[in-house]
Amino acid sequence: MTAETAGAASADIQPGWVTRLKRVPVTLLLAWAVVLLVLAWAALPSLFTGYSGTEGVPGEQLRPPSAEHVLGTDGLGRDVYARIVYGARHSLSGAFVAVTVGLLLGTLLGLIAGARGGWIDAAIMRLVDSMLAVPSLLMSLSIIVLLGFGTINVAIAVGAVSVARFARLARSEVVRVRRSEYVEAAFGSGGTFWAVLYRHVLPNSLTSVIALAALQFGSAILAISTLGFLGYGAPPPTPEWGLLIAEGRNYLSRAWWLTAAPGIVVVLVVLSADRISKALGRTAP
Amino acid sequence: MVRYLLGRVGQALAVLALTFTAAFLLLQVLPGDAIMIKFMSPDMGLTADQIAEIRASYGADRPLWERYFTTVGNFLTGNFGISIQAGVPVSQQLATNLPPTLLLASLAFAAALILTILLASLSNMVGMEWLRAGLQSLPSLFISVPVFWLGIMLIQIFSFQLGLVSVISPGPVEKLVLPVLTLAIPISAPLAQILMRNIDQVLAQPFVAVARAKGASRNWVLWRHVARNAIMPTLTIAGVLFGELLAGAVVTEAVFGLSGLGGLTYQAVGNHDTAVLQAIVVISALAFVTINLIVDLLYPVLDPRLGSRSGAPA
């Protein structure tokens, strides 16, 4: 084999990053662009808009979209684009808390159920079944009644609903990996139960858990905006996306941009999370 | 078979009992309960003794385990307790609020089925590649749309921009058009996704190639052979869809100001009316468990491949 063909072969196996990027579907690139943009909004809102997210300009009420106010202004003269940008922090941090709660609790339950088996497994999985038997919105509402209204409580309530899905996925992954020969070998060579779980089972289950987390991130944004719309989340004038839509409802006949703009942002973010989750190798539980 | 049946029913009952207990614990250990919210307000002018008396009359002063078993007994006899805010039995509230929601939900379900079949068949019959890709990606779009926003947008477009549906005093049918559509679109999304995937799977099977080789047209194969094989597995998500319908109804009724189970839930959350919430949670779990049980038990009957009959003649 000459050096030239060897080089060509290795280039074939490991193409440069430009070539690799070109192979990524356009929709996936767009999805990442949307998510990164919204994350940037949440991190540094003042970089993206000169207007305030909560303070209005008197005399500038209900202006339609223009060069000055890209997405118009609301009934108190607040710039709608600025409110959406500042709202990203509330909606995204809520979704982040929700996914973290679901991921940690659910994965822990699933790991224990799958690894221990027997009656512990049966008890945990029946609990998971009964969580799935109640419509997610009803379950969130029951938890909100217990915890009270507010951003964090809504996020916890949304996260608690996804515990069941993470638990199911984690359990099935553990059961799948446990049967493989290398895990048997790890036990055979003297590995303790928790060490094997941490070193072998956990890393192998990670891909599908992360894919589910991405999917749940989108659903959490949807659920949080729904609960915000119903008035259980942050109180006004917080620029939470669901609340923005709820406020715009009072001006339906006069100002379509108040409800249309934040809604489209929610749809785009949820769609992007869905697309990214699919690309990560989604394994539906 | 009998063993399987008993096991399945037992499992369903266990799930129900757990749901009931969880809902009871979640809703009865509340720090601020409904009695306090209603009677503590200063303008009621009640003394601490009077409040204690009211609590005793509702049985709220007894220990948790005693209340638990009383509630279990009451639920089993169809007594769901008393709504503290409204002062009437919960069963009476359910009786007035269930019918409108059932009507809305069943109309929406029918509309969702039509939409699903339309989407699935169009995306399989349209020749143009770009249009087909567009139709096939519609369900993921539908899933990503917040139900409440969809409702608002439909009001915006059909009532305010086009002036087709009156907002002020719509007729009984006119009043339901937009809510049904609002509820149907997100329900149709998971249905369409599963149906489309199933159609692709069935189309890849050898018997389709045989039918085509015998001279059947693509559409004939699609309707005669593929449809009946592809629709069956869609049944398995019936239970999930029920939950979506109920949750969607809560939001849809809030957006359109309709009265029903959704409106009742919404008020119960605001007033911490736990008796109402517990009844709604338990009833929806009962419906979910029953639907899944029926689907599980019916499946072998409906799918001949799991029974004695052989495949359909080509």
Image (spheres, coloured by chain):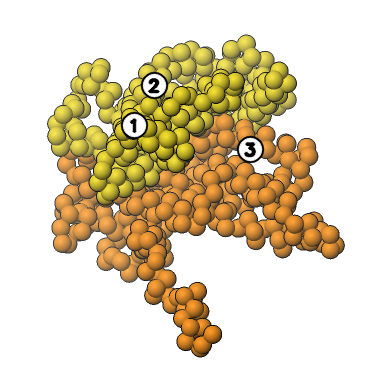
Chain colours: A orange, B yellow
Would residue B84 be visible to someone looking at this image?
no
The three-letter amino acid code for the residue at tag 1 is Ala
The three-letter amino acid code for the residue at tag 3 is Val
Task: State which quadrant residue A83 falls in.
Answer: bottom left
Q: Residue at x 65, y 50 (%)?
A: A173
Pointer 2 and pointer 1 on the same chain: yes
The three-letter amino acid code for the residue at tag 2 is Ser
Question: Could you tell me which chain the residue with mark 2 belongs to?
Answer: B
Q: Which mark is residue B216?
A: 1
* Location of residue B273 in the rendering, given as x and y in whole percent from the top left corner: 52, 26
* Location of residue B211 in the rendering, given as x and y in whole percent from the top left corner: 40, 33
Q: Which mark is residue B106?
A: 2
The furthest residue to the front: B214
| CB atoms of marks 2 and 3 within 8 Å | no
Position of B10 with respect to B214 (left or right) is: right
3D distance between C-alphas at marks 2 and 3: 28 Å
Quadrant of the frame with the N terminus of chain A: bottom right
User: Who comes first in sequence, dot 2 or dot 1?
Assistant: 2
Position of A162 with respect to A191 (left or right) is: left
